Amino acid sequence: MTVPHPPILGTQQWHWPDEAACAAQAAVLAAQSGLADAFIALHGPLGAGKTTFTRHLLRALGVTGRIKSPSYALMETYRVGERPMAHCDFYRFGDPAEFVDAGLRDVFAAPGLKLVEWPEKAGDLLPRPDLALHLEPTGEGDARQVRADAFTPRGLDLLA
């Protein structure tokens, strides 16, 4: 099934020469007021740095303690004050219907930040992301080339 692509309202290109640059970009994003209820889709091959970026973003938002990869659990949740956050990984989905079967529609209907790795595995069942990050290893150590696409006015604000 082909999922139609919503129009891109804005794009930025970032080069992260190392993990410190990834952490710095996460801190910039964490400072944006519109992040609280944003949906950020994370794309890239295995090992691209999707979970690493998410960990840096959650740390910059004030999450303490262990930040686990949700590869097996599908979702890990966090809360800082009144701010709920969900980190999902749909890599193991064999069928988009697993998104519904797992009861994840309620998560996306509720307030809070949603960070999703492998969103394409949920097909057209996910809402439109505010921001999509496409991470690509460059082959030069830990360097990554990143394209950030905004699909909503909130996503555009996050790129400001």
Image (cartoon, helix red, strand yellow):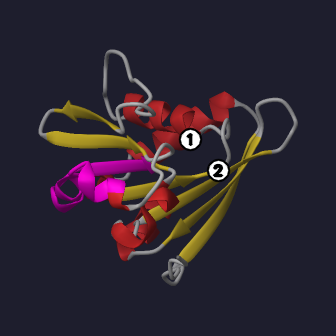
Q: Residue at x 54, y 79 (%)?
A: 8
Question: Where residue 122 appears, x then y in whole percent?
Answer: 42, 60
Q: Answer left or right for 84 relative to 116.
A: left
Which element carries disc 2, helix, strand or loop?
loop
Give the side of residue 10 with respect to residue 135, left or right. Answer: left
Q: Look at label 1 and name its amino acid.
A: Lys
Secondary structure of the residue carrying numbered label 1: helix
Q: Which mark is residue 50?
A: 1
Task: Assess whether residue 93 is covered by the magenta stretch.
Answer: no
Amino acid marked by disc 2:
Gly
User: Looking at this rendering, what residue extends furthest in the left direction?
Assistant: 82
Considering only order in the chain, which callout, 1 or 2, is on the residue closer to the N terminus?
A: 2
Label 1 crowding class (10 Å Cα cut-off): few <14, some 14-19, many 20+? many
Give the residues in magenta.
98-116
- Depth check: 60 or 113 in front? 113
Residue 78, relative to residue 117: is it above or below? above
Residue at point 25%, 32% (across, down): 78
Check the image and report above or below for 155 versus 114. below
Position of residue 2 in the picture relative to residue 101 (left or right):
right
